[in-house]
Image (cartoon, rainbow, N blue to C red):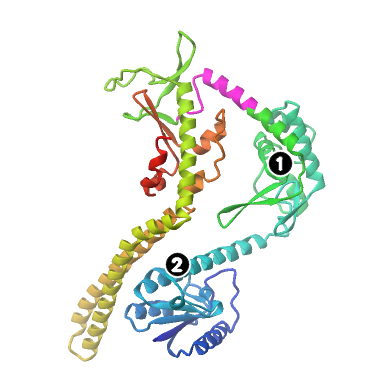
Amino acid sequence: MICVSYTRSVSNCVSIESPKNAIGQQNESIARFIKARGWKLSGKYSDRKSDREDETAFLKMKQDGMDRKFECVVFGSLFYCGKTLTSATDLLGHVFYPAGIHFAVAEDDFCSADVTAEEVDAYIKKIRHEYRARNSSRNTSRYNEKTIYKKYGYVRVGEEELAIDPEPAKIIQRIFRLSCEGNSMKDIAAILNNEGVENAMAYRRRMTGIDYKYGKNGWTDSAISGILRNKVYIGEWHRTINGVDILYSCPPIIDQELFEKARSIIRDRDNAKGKRQTYKGRTLFSKKIVDMETDWPLHVYTLPKDQSKVYRFAYPAPAFRTYDTLYLSCEVVTEEVQKLLGQEQRKLKRAMEAVSGEEGNRAREERIAPLQEKAQRLFFKMAELEENMVSLETAFNQGELNETEYENQSSIILVQIAEADSRIQKFIDGINEIKMVFSEKNPWIKHYRDMEDVEVPLTEVFVKKYVGRIKVYRFERVYFEPYQKEWFDRLPQEWFAGLKED
């Protein structure tokens, strides 16, 4: 196997401070790896400049790979491969490997020739996750000491541990008691401000010594709402790590009973407020509900005969559209939306089962295969163009072409190479997009993944978050359009065939 190596003086990961002898260390690691396998190097590529943007040798290695000048490239670390990790993994995973050019990473004792395509894909994903984790930990650790009081009511005593901060904990307990006594969030904010109680931002300023340029010094109803809704205060600390919601335990500041009582009072108050809004001509679905055929908004009206609420066109109704039925009950719409939200939950469960199993893998590969084939054909086309360029240079150097002829012909080839490279990148982007469709990173799955059982009665917060649009067909049927619908539509619809009429 014709084997080459690539090294770099500056890491593509900003959280890694490269040593002065970075290339020497990589060469030693590569040499040990190659010796253990009985290989021999036929060439070396090295970006030696202390410039993160420099990738001269990387691009030369890319071109030579396309020209089939080697069969495997060895790296000391993928964190020293190209100016960005994304460009490196895209080249290896979507261009080199599909074309039969292998890669090896000495620090991980990994070689793509030893494993399956699925394992290659998993390895690249692992490196990307590690890259994000390194950068994230660097960005947060810069200010770790100063942001220790960032979670109001607690102090961080470790990566996965919180301890109660006594001073704000007393304020939090009082806020819940005031809520349970019937005070609104606006009332609670006024009480604390009148007493001169320091709010969360002012407390953080005092404890850290940092003069934050944002945040008001006084309490607001939104700040009170954030505390009353936060389950961290009953010991449920939710953290999002690499896009996954993880629940950690922490010491509770209030008990479950007090929390539920406060939440119940808030829900009752919200429902009562909603009834008053309905009477004024607004509902939970205002600005979300439209006529399917005209896309005209529907409005709520009160029928004189029984004072019931209905959706219909605002007067004057569109003259070009008349239906046998003139309105639809608000109650019916709400019931139908609840059913459709339940159906969305079932679709989500079905989608998550499919994308995490063989069914999803098979569907993903079926859609990726045509793009990979087209990318590979372009890959070989680029190799031909590179060969034509070499032949052109040879002819020029041997005097068979004058400078004008060489410039004209070479410019045409360079344009063709750039166009082919651009098209390959589009195929790579398309492949990455398909992988997103068939994963839990699908924006539709991400949006509805945390949706709990449909709340009855529906609340304004719930509707705002999960109800994209409601379309009414001739005041006879109700249809629900979720957020991120275009990403749902890209999943195989036969997966959901048995759920549509549930």
Image spot of residue 28 (x, y percent): 55, 87
Look at the image and give the residue range highlighted in magenta.
268-287
Residue appearing at x 49%, y 36% in the figure: 342
The span from disc 1 to disc 2 (Cα, nearest Å) is: 54 Å
161 on left or right of 14 = right
Q: Which is more N-terminal, label 2 or label 1?
A: 2
Q: Which residue is mark 1?
A: 217
| Labels 1, 2: front one | 2
Label total for image: 2
Q: Which residue is mark 2?
A: 118
Residue appearing at x 67%, y 34% in the figure: 221
Image spot of residue 313 (x, y percent): 38, 21
Specify the amino acid type for callout 2.
Answer: Glu
Rendered-image quadrant of the N terminus: bottom left
Question: What crowding class fits label 1: few (fewer than 14 Cα within 10 Å), some (14-19), or many (20 or more)?
Answer: some
**Image-quadrant location for residue 395:** bottom left
257 on left or right of 107 = right
The disc label shown at residue 269, or none: none
